[in-house]
């Protein structure tokens, strides 16, 4: 992570142990770090920096968490209101124990837009970024842009 101004997370949803290490390293090096995930028909984003909550604290992660428990904590930390549950029909598609999560095509596209915009704001020092514990969840289906 030398000569890096910003870390933009592109890791698989279920590699939370690796993500945790990367975000801890970014914090030590005072590098802002963005994680964004496609959730339902939207995108959920959390940004960390040297002054924000740590990645582990934000998501309530503990070393002894199972992969399934860590995934549940990660999801809830990204979308505390779980608005997407109102319209997701087939609840059998998600199985964190088997590392399976449902995906809709608009989610990743929205993630790219949301992450790219936040990265631009940070790198160009434009406008204010809300760092953890703040969460931004934009859901195109419910037309809600929520910041907690």
Image (tube, rainbow, N blue to C red):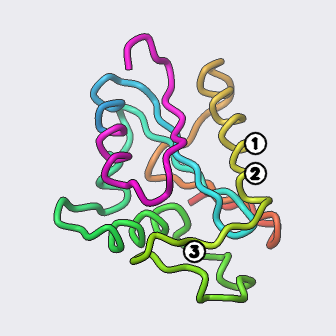
Callout in the foreground (1, 3): 1
Please say if 55 is above or below 7.
below
At horizontal 36% and vertical 24% (from top left) the residue drawn is 30
Q: Which residues are magenta?
A: 1-23
**x%, y% of residue 22?**
35, 37
Who comes first in sequence, dot 2 or dot 3?
A: 3
**x%, y% of residue 91?**
62, 88
Q: Secondary structure at mark 3?
A: loop
Most distant residue in the left direction: 64
Any mark on residue 110, and which? 2
**x%, y% of residue 130?**
55, 42
Pointers 2 and 1 in contact (CB under 8 A)?
yes
At horizontal 65% and vertical 82% (from top left) the residue drawn is 85
At horizontal 29% and vertical 38% (from top left) the residue drawn is 24
Please say if 75 is above or below 56.
below
Query: In the rendered structure, does residue 16 fall within the stretch colored magenta?
Result: yes
- The image quadrant where one finds the N terminus is top left
Any mark on residue 81, and which? 3
In the rendered image, which residue does mark 1 sit on? Answer: 113
Relative horizontal placement of residue 34, taking residue 117 as reference (left or right): left
Callout 1: few (<14), some (14-19), or many (20+) C-alpha neighbours within 10 Å? few
Label 1 to label 3, Cα distance in Å?
22 Å
Callout in the foreground (2, 3): 2
Who comes first in sequence, dot 1 or dot 3?
A: 3
At horizontal 79% and vertical 59% (from top left) the residue drawn is 106
Label 2 to label 3, Cα distance in Å?
19 Å
Label 2 to label 1, Cα distance in Å?
5 Å
Q: Secondary structure at mark 2?
A: helix
**x%, y% of residue 5?**
49, 18
Q: Quadrant of residue 128?
A: top right
């Amino acid at each position: 992570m030398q000569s890096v101004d910003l870390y933009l997370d592109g890791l698989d949803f279920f590699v939370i142990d690796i993500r945790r290490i990367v975000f801890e390293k970014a914090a030590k090096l005072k590098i802002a770090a963005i994680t964004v995930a496609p959730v339902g028909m939207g995108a959920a984003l959390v940004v960390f920096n040297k002054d924000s909550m740590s990645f582990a604290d934000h998501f309530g992660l503990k070393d002894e968490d199972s992969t399934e428990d860590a995934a549940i904590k990660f999801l809830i930390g990204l979308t505390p209101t779980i608005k997407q549950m109102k319209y997701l029909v087939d609840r059998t598609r998600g199985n964190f124990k088997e590392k399976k999560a449902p995906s809709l095509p608009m989610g990743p596209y929205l993630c790219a837009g949301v992450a790219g915009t936040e990265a631009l704001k940070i790198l160009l020092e434009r406008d204010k970024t809300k760092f953890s514990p703040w969460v931004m969840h934009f859901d195109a289906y419910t037309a809600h842009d929520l910041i907690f």
